[in-house]
Image: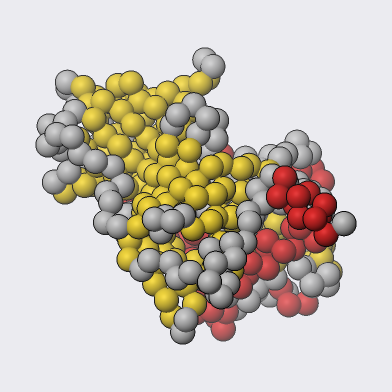
Amino acid sequence: MKRFLILLLAALPGYFTFARSGDGSPVPLKTGNWKGVLQRADGGQIVFIFDVRYEKGKPLLRIHNAGERLEVKQVSQSADSVFIEMPFFESSFRLQQQPDGSLAGNWIKGTSSKTIVMPFTATPGNIPRFTAAAAPQANLTGKWELTFSKNGDTTPAVAQLQQKGALLTGSILTPTGDYRYLEGIVAGDSLYLSTFDGSHAYVFTAAVGEGQTLRGGRFISGPVYQEDFTGRKNEQAMLPMEEVAMRLKGDEDRLNFRFPDINGKPVGINDKRFAGKVVIVQIMGSWCPNCMDETAFLSEYYRRNRGRGVEMVALAYEYSTDTARSNKTLRKFRDRFNVTYPILLTGVTTGDTLRTQKTLPQLTEIKSFPSTVFIGRDGRVKKVHGGFFGPATGEAYTQYKAEFEETVNSLLVE
């Protein structure tokens, strides 16, 4: 029976063996920089850089995306096997150390419909994210108007890029949010950008054409997704934000909801804790990278301004209606960002086409995660904001924060 169980476990997808070499103690990971590669079935590779160090005998990772260093503390080892759990999202790695010290295994990520599994390898050393075969022939610093296309449908976007030598960083903004921290190079007449944060796994490539244009752009995401894009330099490029606009319906002027928090305690907008306060309602999900950035901002803002009469509450729309699964990822979110305002589980999935009607029927359709509702001291909705631009977007993030503070300050003195 024991032999049968061992053979059965070894056949399971994503299973990794525990080597028994020497005394069976963990084999230390090499410290310093590593290059990670997620392998797609079509031959495409999603690459990123991370570093490894040890603190008090425990391995810690930091994933590099431009100016961001995303710390990962949940790393466990047994003999030559390594398990890495990302600090948010349903995202993890199951890996095995190879004889040369590299790692090989799978990246595993939960989604609303299935579990994604991608082959992954990582090699220690100061290996560049992308190799420049030629010196850059152009400087791409500035704002670019992009058009993404797939199956005849098009989506507008704006890239904000900074180039120093061959190094290229920045972000891409769409009406619903941004692609966070992108990093790569310009080599000859081509650009290469990538990012990985446990949910986003992206690579962008394009050729730089004459007249400050981008042609032949290719965007790959995860194991199979792909879009084409083109672009042109345009410092006045703007996004059509009406696409994500939300409003109150008809004569409605108040919200009316009550959902359990992640400890099962019911919390409603009409509770005493919110009475006479300026209340910010965060519409979010633990699966959403832009929600991660917004939560970091809101959590810090709440700590600094709660005493002024500001309250917050988050409404979570998760991948499934499985309460245990949703609360597990929401707790990771809460703990990572030290969230002290209530996070409520709506019980309605992000993919539910009736999600707004079932949870916030006073509003028009929720078109973007995250979105934000501002409620005045009198309990009435004063403003609804769709979308969010995070810290990777530079000027757009600065403007968002300024408008947020202006809105709250004006409501506090009403």
Say which residue appears at 17% left-offset and 43% top-offset: 166
Please tell me whether residue 22 is drawn above or below residue 247 in the rendered image.
Answer: below
Image quarter where the N terminus lies is bottom right
Q: Position of residue 109 (x, y in %)?
A: 62, 48
Q: Viewed as shown, does residue 15 lie left or right of 79?
A: right
Residue 239 visible in this rendered orientation of the protein:
no
Q: Is residue 397 left or right of residue 125?
A: right
Quarter of the figure with residue 262 = bottom right
For this orientation, the residue located farthest to the top is 152
In x, y percent, where is residue 167?
21, 47
Residue 214 vs residue 204, the one in the foreground? 204
Q: How is the image coloured?
A: secondary structure
**Residue 15, percent from left and from top:** 67, 51
Front residue of 281 and 348:
348
Residue drawn at x 79%, y 72% as measured from the top left = 263
Query: Viewer-proximal residue, 368 or 248?
Result: 368
Is the residue 266 above or below the residue 120 in the image?
below
Residue depicted at x 63% and y 42%: 116
Residue 214: percent from the left, percent from the top? 27, 25
Q: Residue furthest right?
A: 1
Residue appearing at x 33%, y 61% in the figure: 33
Among the 4 quarters of the image, the one containing residue 89: bottom right
Quarter placement of the C terminus: bottom right
| Relative height, residue 349 to residue 276 (above, below) | above
Give the image quarter of residue 313: bottom right
The number of callouts visible is 0
370 vs 133: above or below: below
Residue 293 seen from this side = yes
